[in-house]
Image (spheres, helix red, strand yellow):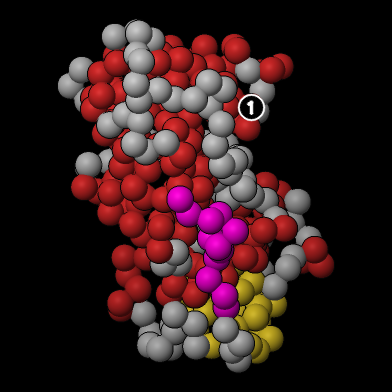
Amino acid sequence: MIDPTTVDIPDIPVHKTQHGKFDPMAVVWDAEKHKKLAAGTVWFDPEVQRSFRAAHAQKISKTWNIAMADPVHLSVRDDGTEVIIDGAHTAWAAMDNGVKSLPCIRHYGLTKRQEAAFHLRHQSARQADSAADKWGLKIAAGIPQYVDADKVLRKHNLVVGSHIKAAGALDFVVKNYGADALESVILTMNAWVPGGAKREDWTASSVIRSLGFLFGNYPLVATPAQLGKKLGTKVTPRYLDTQIAENSKGGGGSGSRFRVGSKMIADIWNIRRKTNLYPIGVLGVEPADEDEGEDD
């Protein structure tokens, strides 16, 4: 099992920075054009920061006050172009208000992975990125278990966002138990649902967390195929997810729900078995971070 305290965003090396200004009106927002841009051009690279949210940018624009605007962070790349690594919504709002000069901090010598890691660190005290955005950024930042988890998802033709909405649940599994546990969850879900898990099945976030907890702590009790087949004789993933919510204290929060869910799954597995039982109460190593946030 992975020690969650060792899972961290990569350190940002000491590097040259320079305070200055840039013209928001000249920002190129279409990432497809970046290879044609001249040195000094500022552009938006969605791979190194959260998805652009038009509603959020418009909200900033409607109440625009340049005195309240934080400096936009730009990374100067080897080709001389400058990528926004934090403050894209501020830059868009400034553009929307006709502002031609906005304070910025230019960073020199960062790799693309370090740009993504910088965004993750710098956003910690701001509006939280969605779980899906955090997932993508952790992969872009090169965090090993997330890179491995991405390979597992691709192997099973799954994509966070289009196939799996419960990104927070996936993060919970990978952060605490690693990519192997995630693969066991996927195999269980596919064995559970006839023809393999569908998009609606992957919304069962408490079920995903609960399975991750069981495979992370008791990988030898049941194979994914065995557990999935047994669960399939009793309940569907989405129905079990609703039952977990109803049986959690006060509606719960994901922290209490995954504990309730783990016991419910264990109870189903243990029916009429004398060997290879999950322990009563489903003990085990508690995750360091129970909840990654919303599953969007």
* Residue 128 at least partly seen: yes
Magenta stretch secondary structure, dominant? loop
Q: Residue furthest front?
A: 274
Q: Residue furthest left?
A: 195
Query: In the rendered view, does 161 fall on the left or right side of 158?
Result: right
Which residue is found at the position 74% from the left and 65% from the top? 69
Query: In the rendered view, does 20 fall on the left or right side of 74?
Result: right
Stretch of the chain drawn in magenta: 1-12
Task: From the viewer's side, name the closer residue of 99 and 280.
Answer: 280
Binning the other alpha carbons within 10 Å of mark 1 as few (below 14), some (14 to 19) or many (20 upward) gives some
Residue with the mark numbered 1? 256
Looking at the picture, does residue 129 appear above or below residue 157? Answer: below
Which residue is found at the position 71% from the left and 49% from the top? 62
Residue 86 is drawn in which quadrant?
bottom right
Q: Is residue 186 magenta?
A: no
Looking at the picture, does residue 162 appear above or below residue 82? Answer: above
Which residue is found at the position 51% from the left and 43% from the top? 172
Number of callouts in the render? 1
Of helix, strand and loop, which one carries label 1? helix
Q: Position of residue 175 (x, y in %)?
A: 50, 50
Residue 101 is drawn in which quadrant?
bottom right
Amino acid type at image mark 1: Ser
Task: From the viewer's side, name the closer residue of 100 and 38.
Answer: 38
Q: Position of residue 26 (x, y in %)?
A: 51, 73
Task: From the viewer's side, name the closer residue of 188 and 236.
Answer: 188
Q: Position of residue 179 (x, y in %)?
A: 36, 50
Which residue is found at the position 49% from the left and 75% from the top? 114
